[in-house]
Image: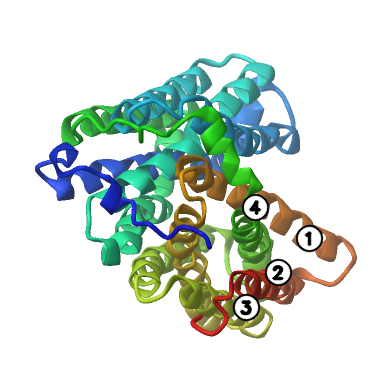
Amino acid sequence: MHSTTSIASKTPHDIRPQSPVFAEFALGLGGFALGTGEFASMGLLPDVARDVHVSIPIAGHMISAYALGVVIGAPLLAAVFARTGRRAMLVGLMSFFALGNLLCAAASSYGLIVTARFLAGLPHGAYFGIASIVAASLVPPNKRAQAVARVMLGLSVANVLGVPFATWIGQVAGWRAAFGVVAAIGLTTALLCRLALRQMPAPEEASPLTELSALARGQVWLTLGIAAIGFGGVFAVYSYITPLLTEVTGMREAHVPLILSVIGAGMVAGSLFGGWLADKGIMRAIWITLVLNAVALGLVAITAHSTVLVTVNMFFVGFAALAIGPALQTRLMDVAADAQALAAALNHSAFNFANALGAWVGGTAIAAGLGWTSTGPIGAGLALGGLAIWGVAAWVSGEKRTA
């Protein structure tokens, strides 16, 4: 039987902050910083490419470098610093993230930019993993997923406010200034975490080997599989949203950012809904949100020819995408037993794998001549693939009757 012991029950009352709201704000601001830093770089590609004298596709390697940093850094940092206090780790991770972005701002060559982006990505997954554990410890057991959702809300808000703002800064003051702003938000987060959280020592049983024990648990891998496959469908569509809207819908390129904001608004609503739904039943929330993903993505091919319909549907694409996040994050914390930090961090490695998978599968379909709208049905297929893995997880754990 796997452990479903609440994180909150393991946290002594005397280490909780006097203001959980302040603590959640600080943790969520970190999500905002990470989301802004990750996605704003996409809008800055042309300027970066011009300054360092490479093509835009080559400059795009800095996006891949960041994702690789997330995939490697999440398990590595969670395991190596397993015995580090939670507050100290959060402060250190955000300080390192800020340093990575400052290096980006100061980089004078393509190689240095790619290296700096890799370094900036290293703390991403570990931060979200530790922040989720801390947030869950601040609330009663039946409110854990909603607390996790509020941390992840920062990532959603970044798509609505942070990314457009950083892109604007880049256009007005240069791309280096945009990375400087991201670094400032990271340092502010580190300071607020230091002020908002009391000292939170790691569990007594924590160690690198204990954290690595998560890798021996089948339910951990199945849950990661749901994220890696099921979440990939969103990126099959999102990666090619601009040509879809301009070539199929007939929108002007200048209007594309408005649709991206609509998707971001859907993500904000979906994150809050997903936290509420997961607290009603985690496994049920996972399959419901996967079905919502499949439906919303499948409708892309039908709605893409209408400006009104595609706008409405893109809201639900964003909604369904982030609605699954809190349930998967909380599920990993439950099935990992004493290796919660590593498991929670690995969730974001899985999401970045989904990013790469979705973009690759979608691009393959387009290259094969299936058209821009093919990314929708293909994305729906990936969501259904995640649902199939959910079925295996439910059957293996014996939860199929209560899911």
* Residue that mark 2 sits on: 382
* Residue closest to the eye, 311 or 201: 201
Q: Nearer the viewer, mark 1 or mark 2?
A: 2
Q: Reading the chain from its start, which is encountered first: label 1 or label 2?
A: 1
In this rendering, position of residue 228 left or right of residue 369: left
The picture places residue 109, in percent across and down from the top left corner, at 65, 16
In this rendering, position of residue 391 left or right of residue 399: right
Q: Secondary structure at mark 1?
A: helix
Q: Amino acid at mark 3?
A: Ala
Mark 3: few/some/many CA within 10 Å (<14, 14-19, 20+): many
Residue 317, relative to residue 69: is it above or below?
A: below
Q: Is residue 3 visible?
A: yes
Mark 2: few/some/many CA within 10 Å (<14, 14-19, 20+): many
Check residue 361 in the rendering and tell me which mark sits there, or answer none. Answer: 1
Q: Residue at x 29, y 47 (%)?
A: 10
Q: Is residue 121 visible?
A: no
Q: Amino acid at mark 2?
A: Leu
Q: Reading the chain from its start, which is encountered first: label 3 or label 4?
A: 3
Q: Reading the chain from its start, which is encountered first: label 1 or label 4?
A: 4
Check residue 355 in the rendering and tell me which mark sits there, or answer none. Answer: 4
Residue 357, relative to residue 182: is it above or below?
A: below
Q: Amino acid at mark 1?
A: Val
Q: Reading the chain from its start, which is encountered first: label 3 or label 1?
A: 3
- Which residue sits furthest front? 1
* Residue closest to the eye, 163 or 331: 331
Q: Amino acid at mark 4?
A: Asn
* Residue that mark 3 sits on: 294
Q: CA distance from mark 1 to mark 2?
A: 9 Å
